[in-house]
Amino acid sequence: MYGLRKVEKYFPGVHALRRVDFHVNRGEIVGLVGENGAGKSTLMKVIYGAYQPDAGGIFIDDKEVRFQNPRQAMENGIGMVFQEQSLIPNLTVMENIFLGYERQFVNFGVINWNAFAEAAKKQLAKVKLDIDPATITSELSFAQRQLVDLAKVLTIEDRIEGDLVILLDEPTSVLAREEVELLFGLVRGLTKRASFIFVSHRIDEVLDLSDRIYVMKDGAIVDVVNHDEVNVDSIQHKMVGREIDTEYYREQKQKPYNASEVLLSFDNVSLGTRYKDISFELHPGEVLCLVGTEGSGREAILRTVFGLEAPDSGTVTIKNEQVWHFTAEGGVWRGVGYVPRERKIEGIVGGMNVYENMTLSQMQNFSRAGTLLESNEKAFAREWIERLGIKTPSENKDCGGLSGGNQQKVVLAKWRSGGSDIILLDHPTRGLDIGAKEDVYEMIREMCDAGVGILLVADTLEEAIGLSHTILVIKDGEFQKRFDGTPGSKPSLYDLLHHMI
């Protein structure tokens, strides 16, 4: 059995963990839920050895242990699959799987690549992933990379004799339903050798997979529930400390958009095999959602609008001007803001603080004669921190150290504060808890009221239906069906699925 007893963790201005008692039994799957900022990530990092507790203890089979780093934790059978993944994109799959443990394949200074590949195939077989281990990791889909990450963690079992404890941090956040079911099947099959701690904001998935569920709020465990005793409404209430707004997607605040003006138009636009002959218009105050399965072309359309990918044919017009040159700089100049799916890679700059991230797209507004006016930047950031309710000790906090929901608010603040009137949202609520999602939905309605046009790729079909004025279904890169999303006459899940698959 693995456990924590009365664990405390402090950061400057933050009491991150408060007398946390937590344990996972042999072969058990334990769920962990809570709002962004509740302390889940800190708890996971203490378990994994990335942080050391300031008080309390960590115990394995009633023997107290103390890990100075993740490698020591791994040597004791503890591994972690990260939400943002820990793989190095330009390395091969096999190099990622055995990163730091390559010496076993070296003889007299020469790497035995055949042995390297065979060992990697053995690990990939554990997660039922049939790919060439010499493949460059960046060429894989997100779901494949997630399985490679799990295979990497499972190499621990070949190095230790005891049981494993594997931490899964939002492993399903961008997986399709069939991919989630595959992952869950693998996890259940591995419980003969490993225990799992599963962190997710999708409570239905936590209920489906977990034997017990811990609920966190403000750094403390506020409840522990067995699988057969779970009440979803009760868990949500304990997570956020208040009743959940029954008007979850703020449909009552959805107002008609300005159909007489066009902010963005696609006219028979195509891009290789990604999408073909796509046409639509986006108006001020409109939420237009692109719906489709993974790889249907939705994300590529957003990246074209921002200027990251140039189309092969067709006409893209932004604010009555045809776009000829596609660059991100040009997108920003045209007033387009982009909130990407992988916010830690493309949304924020880790290592830069909150105010630097907020002002990154509008540095010209905070400089004079080539000198940055840092005090103006900070004052500006404090205003938006208060306006959006961003939980951070100060504007000087490293943005990479914020919770996912607060990072997302920083990215949204960056574009809204810069005056962007076309906002591209690619899975904007991925990895966010129910309270943070409500905040994002409220911001979307406020942006619409201000005349912003929003092009959305939603995290779920329910989210797409609840938020959108207009829904376009894309299948295999081609337009299938347009739905009107007026409150009271919104399409059903079946209506969308019928045209998606």
Image (spheres, rainbow, N blue to C red):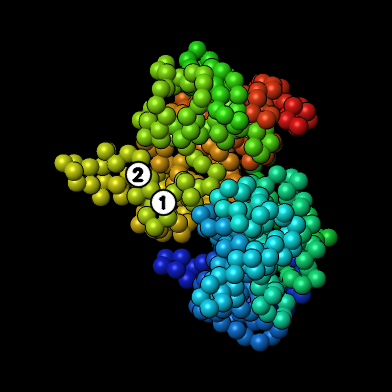
Please, what secondary structure does the residue beneath circle 2 have? Answer: helix
Q: Amino acid at mark 1?
A: Val
Which of the 4 quarters of the picture holds residue 252? Answer: top right
The residue beneath circle 1 is 349
- Quadrant containing the C terminus is top right
Residue projecting furthest to the top: 260
Give the residue at the far right of this rendering: 228
Q: Residue at x 58, y 41 (%)?
A: 427
- Residue drawn 77% across and 72% down? 193
Classify 10 Å Cα crowding around label 2: few (below 14), some (14-19), many (20 and above).
some
Residue shown at 46%/65% (left/top)?
14
Residue 238 higher or lower than 269, as above or below: below
Quadrant hosting residue 222: bottom right
Residue 120: percent from the left, percent from the top? 66, 64
The picture places residue 36, in percent across and down from the top left corner, at: 56, 55
| Residue in front for this viewpoint, 454 or 305 | 305
Q: Is residue 394 above or below residue 26?
A: above
Q: Which residue is mark 2?
A: 360
Residue 338: give x, y in percent of width and height.
Answer: 47, 37
Q: CA distance from mark 1 to mark 2?
A: 9 Å
Question: Picture coordinates of residue 286 (x, y %)?
Answer: 54, 24
Mark 1–mark 2 contact, CB under 8 Å? Answer: yes
Give the mark nearest the N terminus, 1 or 2: 1
**Quick check: can you spot residue 428?**
yes
